[in-house]
Image (tube, helix red, strand yellow):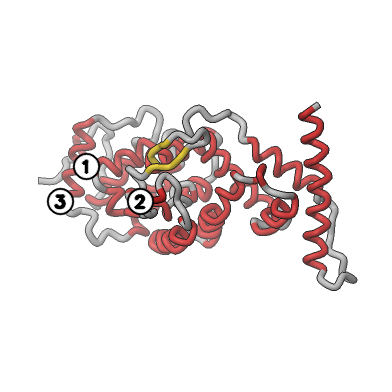
């Protein structure tokens, strides 16, 4: 016997049983939307009954988006996981639960639980949907890292990029969403290491993420990086790499390629690296004083 959604305390009823499961989970992200154990159990019963078999992911997208844009997206994701729906819709994300990763202080955390915290951090700052969706995907390559390397995850970007591409194709999201998710997968951990980089590497990083040409997308990427940083236990409220890279960007303002140079792109990169070196060296001396 299926779930009698009409009697649900959430008062939700949709024609499609699969959509019912997803709607109930999505509404858990709303204020005061936390689900009780009985409701989650009944959702699990529906999933075990097979309502999500052959359910088109494009039909799941509106409810996933609804929950991601809620006040506490982690409650939706938790309900999906506890009911078995996450394994059906986003098995790549479900596989991250139980996988260890070192936090900002070297302590080991569960990556799946960390992703739930990231989702809530982005809700706190009102991040747009593209950023919140990318926040589910950038660690997908860590689900099957070699056990002997844990809690490190060597080459996870190589494993993660095709998985991100597959998830985006499955939900048929826009090129904007796909591009940001792929960019975050490739560059987030490099941005976290920006303080360790030489000026030339910082200039190359800013060029790779097109911080000079796509400032809005760069801002979205930094929002995600900051959420990832703050989601770790005991993290400071301010993401330190944001100020460093903002200083680097300002130092490069007004620099343009010299068309007379033998290699204009290389010359511009060198000019940016020199400007960044001057700016950061000055700031670091000021901090020491």
Number of the front mark, 1 or 2 = 2
Identify which residue is drawn at 79% across, 36% down: 283
Question: Residue under circle 2?
Answer: 147
The answer to which of marks 3 and 1 sits earlier in the sequence is: 1
Identify which residue is drawn at 35% across, 39% down: 76
Secondary element type, mark 3: loop
Between the residue at mark 3 and the residue at mark 1, the CA separation in whole angstroms equals: 10 Å
Mark 3 Cα within 10 Å, few/some/many (few <14, many 20+)? Answer: few
In the current view of this chain or complex, which residue is farthest to the right? 260
Q: Position of residue 20 (x, y in %)?
A: 26, 46
In the current view of this chain or complex, which residue is farthest to the left? 1
Q: Is residue 67 left or right of residue 12?
A: right
Mark 1 and mark 3 in contact (Cβ < 8 Å)? no
Between the residue at mark 1 and the residue at mark 2, the CA separation in whole angstroms equals: 33 Å
Q: Position of residue 221 (x, y in %)?
A: 59, 48
Question: Residue under circle 1?
Answer: 43
The answer to which of marks 1 and 2 sits earlier in the sequence is: 1
For the question of whether residue 195 can be seen, the reply is yes
Question: Residue under circle 3?
Answer: 49
For the question of whether residue 73 can be seen, the reply is no
Mark 2 and mark 1 in contact (Cβ < 8 Å)? no
């Amino acid at each position: 016997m299926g779930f009698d959604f009409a009697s649900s305390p959430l008062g939700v009823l949709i024609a499609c049983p699969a959509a019912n499961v997803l709607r109930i989970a999505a509404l858990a992200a709303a204020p005061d939307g936390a689900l009780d154990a009985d409701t989650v159990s009944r959702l699990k019963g529906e999933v075990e009954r097979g309502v999500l078999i052959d359910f088109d992911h494009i039909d799941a997208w509106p409810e996933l988006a609804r929950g991601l844009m809620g006040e506490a997206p982690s409650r939706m994701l938790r309900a999906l996981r506890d009911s078995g729906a996450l394994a059906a819709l986003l098995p790549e994300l479900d596989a991250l639960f139980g996988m260890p990763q070192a936090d900002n202080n070297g302590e080991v955390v569960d990556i799946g639980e960390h992703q739930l915290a990231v989702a809530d951090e982005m809700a706190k700052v009102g991040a747009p949907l593209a950023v919140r969706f990318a926040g589910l995907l950038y660690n997908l390559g860590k689900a099957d890292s070699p056990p002997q390397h844990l809690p490190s995850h060597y080459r996870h970007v190589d494993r993660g990029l095709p998985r991100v591409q597959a998830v985006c194709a499955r939900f048929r999201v826009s090129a904007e969403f796909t591009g940001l998710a792929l960019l975050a997968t490739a560059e987030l951990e490099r941005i976290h290491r920006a303080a360790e980089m030489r000026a030339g590497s910082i200039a190359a990083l800013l060029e790779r993420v097109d911080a000079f040409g796509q400032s809005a997308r760069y801002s979205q990427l930094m929002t995600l990086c900051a959420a990832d940083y703050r989601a770790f236990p005991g993290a400071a409220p301010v993401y330190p790499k944001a100020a460093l890279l903002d200083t680097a960007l300002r130092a490069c303002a007004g620099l343009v390629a010299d068309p007379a140079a033998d290699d204009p792109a290389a010359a511009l990169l060198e000019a940016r690296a020199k400007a960044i070196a001057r700016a950061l060296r000055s700031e670091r001396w000021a901090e020491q004083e």
